[in-house]
């Protein structure tokens, strides 16, 4: 046996890896600005010019068990977008413009077409938010993962001026909470989804693979408008695991709380269907799933209407869903109106 055939016999197909690299070479050629080029062991870029006191903000995440839904449906073109959104939409919550992204793909057996679709989705999403896909790794794990199984992880770094870093301390009691519409379940709640499918209470369908909405470009446009017009944005929250109660209070300081009116927005169709099949109360749904709100903006009352108009112009549905209140007034960090 040659070294290559011996490795293939152990479950790692080096030839498939070569084929995968050939397939994605054109896609990753868009890594303009990588100072090390295609053959580097890492990726390197210069920090953008014009920053006086730049701060880097980083985030890492995955897409959880949504990967199993993609595997069962044999569809891999959307889940890379989920990965970018889960990371970049965290970074932008601190006012940072996504700068570069790296991905990690683990597979039981490398299937070049599948892997190309996965990485292609990542590249497409990065291009959409003007973020460099600076590098990544694709690893085969025969014996640890079955053929067809895969997992994704991502790493995003953004940049912001130190005096424009958003950390919730600018929020004030009386500020308005704007809720931006989700595109579905995003990448949370899929252990529940899989359980419902197994019990035949939910149909396995492409609707479950609707990718996480990429909010980064819309939020950056909103932040640019805020600086231009002098609006005060007090905080931002990406609504992921734990739903509204776990995430909205993260947009304000610990002395403040969030009061939400659940009647002020429609629950997204797929989210509503999953909650209904699971027998969840509305309150449990909002504490488990995104309930139709994927991102929230804390903004001064006088700028709320203009901010909503800007988001609408960009094709993003958004609503006034609540307000900021003193935490001691509501006995905690989160309260829902009856």
Image: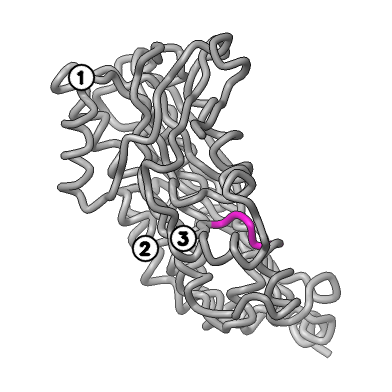
List the residue tagged with mark 2.
124
| Residue that protrudes farthest toward the bottom in the picture | 1
Residue 14 position, x and y percent, is: 67, 79
Evaluate if marks 1 and 2 touch, with contact meaning CB atoms under 8 Å apart.
no
Evaluate whether residue 41 shows in this view: yes
Q: Quadrant of the N terminus?
A: bottom right
Q: Residues within 10 Å of mark 2 (few under 14, many from 20)?
A: some
Give the residue at mark 1.
302
Q: Is residue 71 magenta?
A: no
Point 57% across, 78% down: residue: 18
Percent x, y for residue 269?
44, 64
Label located before the other in sequence (3 or 1):
3
User: Magenta segment range?
Assistant: 187-191
> What's the CA distance linking mark 3 and mark 1?
30 Å
Quote the CA–CA distance across marks 2 and 3: 19 Å
What is the count of numbered marks?
3
Q: Quadrant of residue 172?
A: top left
């Amino acid at each position: 046996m040659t070294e290559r055939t011996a490795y293939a016999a152990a479950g790692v197909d080096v030839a498939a890896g070569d084929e995968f690299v050939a397939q994605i070479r054109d896609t990753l050629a868009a890594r303009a600005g990588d100072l090390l080029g295609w053959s580097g062991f890492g990726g390197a870029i210069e920090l953008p010019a014009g920053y006086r006191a730049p701060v880097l903000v980083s985030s890492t995440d995955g897409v959880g068990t949504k990967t199993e839904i993609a595997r069962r449906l044999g569809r891999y073109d959307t889940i890379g977008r989920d990965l970018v959104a889960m990371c970049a939409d965290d970074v932008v919550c601190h006012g940072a413009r996504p700068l570069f992204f790296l991905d990690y793909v683990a597979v039981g057996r490398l299937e070049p077409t599948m892997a190309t679709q996965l990485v292609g989705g990542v590249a497409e999403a990065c291009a959409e938010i003007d973020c460099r896909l600076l590098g990544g790794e694709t690893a085969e794990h025969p014996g640890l993962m079955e053929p067809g199984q895969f997992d994704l992880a991502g790493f995003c770094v953004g940049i912001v001026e130190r005096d424009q870093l958003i950390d919730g301390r600018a929020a004030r009691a009386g500020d308005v909470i704007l809720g931006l519409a989700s595109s579905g379940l995003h990448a949370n709640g899929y252990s529940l989804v899989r359980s419902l499918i197994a019990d035949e209470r939910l149909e396995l369908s492409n609707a479950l693979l609707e990718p996480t909405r990429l909010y980064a470009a819309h939020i950056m446009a909103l932040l640019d408008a805020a600086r231009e017009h002098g609006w005060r944005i007090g905080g931002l929250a990406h609504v992921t695991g734990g739903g509204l109660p776990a995430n909205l209070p993260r947009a304000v300081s610990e002395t403040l709380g969030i009061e939400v009116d659940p009647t002020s927005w429609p629950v997204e169709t797929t989210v509503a269907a999953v909650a209904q099949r699971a027998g969840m109360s509305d309150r449990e749904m909002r504490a488990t799933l995104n309930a139709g709100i994927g991102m929230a903006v804390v903004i001064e009352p006088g700028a709320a209407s203009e901010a909503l108009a800007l988001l609408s112009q960009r094709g993003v549905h958004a609503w006034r869903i609540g307000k900021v209140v003193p935490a001691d007034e509501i006995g905690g960090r989160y309260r829902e109106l009856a």
